[in-house]
Amino acid sequence: MSTETLVAIIVPCVIVLLLIGVGLWAVSRRRHLKHRFGPEYERTVEEAGGRLPADRELRSRERRHDSLQIRELPPDLRQQYAEDWSRVQERFVDRPESAVSEADSLVSRLMRERGYPTEGYEQQLQDLSVEHGRTLEHYRDAHDVLARRGGHATTEELRGAMVHYRALFDELLAAPSGAGSGGSRTEET
């Protein structure tokens, strides 16, 4: 077999193998993003107008999150936050709208304590989505109820908001060995 024939066979084979490798890498990366972000992955695909822009957006969120100083809470501080939540919940009976507002503030304080920036709601969503994508919809739902202040939210909606805040609160408060995806990204790598 001539050298030209070998080159004509080998070069296309190498190109095909490279394309297969790149394709497998892309599928693996997308699977990683889907697993890590949970329902937030599909939401981002819809908002970004496709999988490629969504993948870029989510990788950007991962890079930002990796640069944050996310930290676990010591047990005594975790206990204090749990007690604070109990007090907020107790206030719900007499002042539901005020209790929901306090729950929002408590979640923001807890985020800040863990090392998440709290400079704006949209940025909070993006930062939380990396480690808490599976409970992020709870945060959105609670925030939507809180946005309907001025007596427009029913007591049942406010109760739902408390439940939604509680889902994210519990995950943010969870000990490193707890269930869920809470935990520092830097410890995983």
Image (cartoon, grey):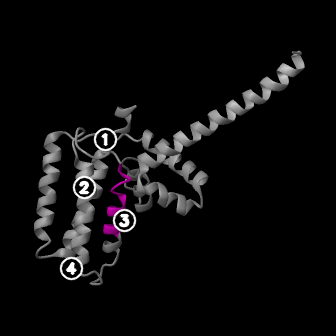
Residue 8 drawn above or below residue 111: above
Q: Which residue is mark 4?
A: 155
Which residue is tagged 2?
169
What distance separates the C-alpha of mark 2 from that of mark 4? 21 Å
In the rendered structure, which disc, 1 or 2, sits on the residue that comes first in sequence?
A: 2
N-term-proximal mark, 4 vs 3? 3
Label 1: few (<14), some (14–19) or many (≥20) C-alpha neighbours in 10 Å: many
Using residue 17 as the reference point, say whether residue 58 is left or right of it: left
User: Residue under circle 1?
Assistant: 183
Say which amino acid is labelled 4: Thr
In the picture of the structure, the residue carrying the numbered disc 3 is 140
Q: Nearer the viewer, residue 133 or 109?
A: 133
Q: How far across and down, in percent of the image, does residue 144 sit? A: 35, 72
What's the amino acid at mark 2?
Phe
Residue range highlighted in magenta:
132-143
Residue 70 lies in what quarter of the image? Answer: top left
Q: Looking at the figure, which quarter contains the N terminus?
A: top right
Name the amino acid type tagged 3.
Arg
Q: Residues within 10 Å of mark 4 (few under 14, many from 20)?
A: some
In contact (CB < 8 Å): disc 1 and disc 4: no
Q: Earlier in the sequence, mark 2 or mark 4?
A: 4
Q: Which structural element holds mark 2?
A: helix
C-alpha distance separating marks 1 and 2? 13 Å
What residue is drawn where x is 25% and y is 39%? 176
Residue 162 within the segment the image draws in magenta: no
